[in-house]
Amino acid sequence: MPTELEELVGFIAHPNPQIRLVAIENLVPYSVSEPSIFKTENLTPVKHLKFLIRDHPKIAEHALTILINLTADANIVEFVASDEKFLGIALGLLVDAKEPNANLLAMLLANMTKWDGLKSIISRKQPVPGSLHSDELVLNQLMDLFVKGADGSYNKHADYDYLAYALADLSKHEEIRQFFLTQQEYDSVLPLNKIKVFTEHKSDIRRKGVANIIKNVAFDVPSHPKFLDEDQINILPYLLLPIIGNEQYDEDEMLDMLPDLQLLPPDKQRDPDNNNIQTHVETLTLLTTTREGRNLMRNVKVYPVIRETHLRVEDDGVREACERLVNVIMADEAEGGAEKGVEEEDDDDNRIVEI
C-alpha cells in the first residue's frame, strides 16, 4: 500500500487546482528530505511536475522548486533534460518577459545542463520575443536574457543570474566554446564580450558562473590571440581586476601595468570568493600556453599582482594556482620555450541547485 506521502504526491495531478496547490505546497520540503516519493511508478510524479510548470503561477512555482531539488539526481536530470517537448516549453516560458517564475526556470536549466546531451542546444531555435531584441538561436536568447537581467530591464521578476551556471556547464563542450568565440550575425558581437564585464558584478552567482565560462573557453588554445588582442576580447583586465586589492605597487611596476589597473581607488577590494580568484589565476595560466601569452604577461607586469595575491589571500588553492602561474611566467624561455599542451579539468563544483 502507498504511504500517506505517496498518496499526497498523487494529488498533484488532481483536476481541482485548489487541491493541487495544497498538495504541492506541502510536498516541497520532501523533495529534499524524501525524494524517493517522487520516483514511484516509473517517475510518474515527475511527469506530472513537468506538466505543472504551466499551471497557476503559485502551483508552477512549487513544481519548479521540486524539480530543481529532484534534478540533483543524475537519473532524474536526464529524464527531465532529454524530454524535448518539456525543454521547448521551459525555454519558451524562460524568455517570456512577464514570466513570474523565470529565475526558477533558469535554476532548473542550470541543473539540466549537467546532462551532456543538452549540448544539442547549440543548434536549437525558437521564436524570439520582440522586446528581447535577439535572434532565433536559443543560446543567443539566453545570452541576451543574462545581460538584460543584470539591471532588471527585461523582466521585473527576474535577474537570470543562474543562467551563468547553465552557460558555464554548456561551455565545457567544444562546439559551445566556439559559439562564445564567434561573432553573431544579428548584433555583430562576440558572446564572450557580452559577459566578461560581469567578473566584478555584485552577484556571487554571476561572478562564479562567468569566471568558469571564461576559463572553459580559454581551453581553446587557437583562440588565445583573440583573447589577448585589445581590439577583440582583451580579457586580461577582466581577469586581473577581480584579483587585485588596494595594495600599493612600486612606481616602476605600476607604470607597465595595464591602464585599467592603474589609479585604482584606495578602497578597491578583490573578489571575496577565493574560488573565483583561483579560477581567474588558472585562466591566466591557460593563457600562458603560447609564447605570445607569456611575453605579454611579463610585459604588463602580471607577476606583481600574482605575488600580492599569493601573499594576501590565505587559501591553499589560490596560492597553489599562483605558484603554478609564477613558475611559467618567470621561467627562462631559453631552457624550454616549447608550447605547452593544455589538459582540461573536471570542475569539482557541480553547482547543483537546491532550494
Image: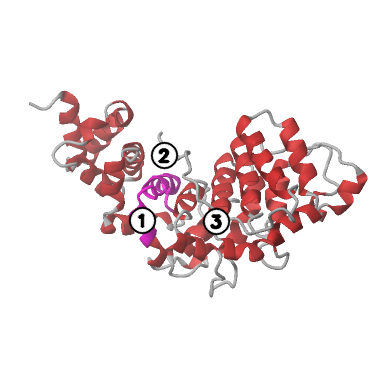
Task: List x then y, in percent, for residue 295.
Answer: 75, 58
In depth, the one of 201 and 7 nearer the eye is: 201
Question: Looking at the picture, which amino acid does disc 3 mark?
Answer: Phe
In depth, the one of 327 and 319 nearer the eye is: 327
Q: In this view, does 334 lie above or below 128?
A: above
Q: Quadrant of the N terminus?
A: top left
Q: Which of marks 1 and 3 is nearer the N terminus?
A: 1
Task: List x then y, in percent, for residue 12.
Answer: 21, 38
Kindly give the residue lying farthest to the right in the view shown.
251
Question: Looking at the picture, which amino acid does disc 1 mark?
Answer: Leu
Q: Is residue 350 above or below residue 116?
A: above
Instruction: Tell me whether circle 1 and circle 2 mark residues in contact (CB < 8 Å).
Output: no
**Disc 1 versus disc 3: distance between alpha carbons?**
20 Å
In the rendered structure, find residue 20 and report the number of the disc placed on it: none
In depth, the one of 216 and 337 nearer the eye is: 337
Kindly give the residue lying farthest to the bottom in the view shown.
185
Question: What secondary structure is the magenta-colored segment mainly?
Answer: helix
**Disc 1 versus disc 2: distance between alpha carbons?**
15 Å
In the rendered structure, find residue 219 and report the number of the disc placed on it: 3
How is the model colour-coded?
A: secondary structure
The residue indicated by pointer 2 is: 352
Q: What SS does tag 2 mark? A: loop
In the rendered structure, find residue 118 and report the number of the disc placed on it: 1
Residue 213 highlighted magenta (yes or no): no
Q: Which of marks 1 and 2 is nearer the N terminus?
A: 1
Residue 117 highlighted magenta (yes or no): yes
Question: How many numbered marks are there?
Answer: 3
Q: Is residue 46 above or below residue 316?
A: below
Q: Earlier in the sequence, mark 3 or mark 2?
A: 3
Question: Looking at the picture, which amino acid does disc 2 mark?
Answer: Ile
Q: Is residue 139 visible?
A: yes
Span of residues in magenta: 98-120
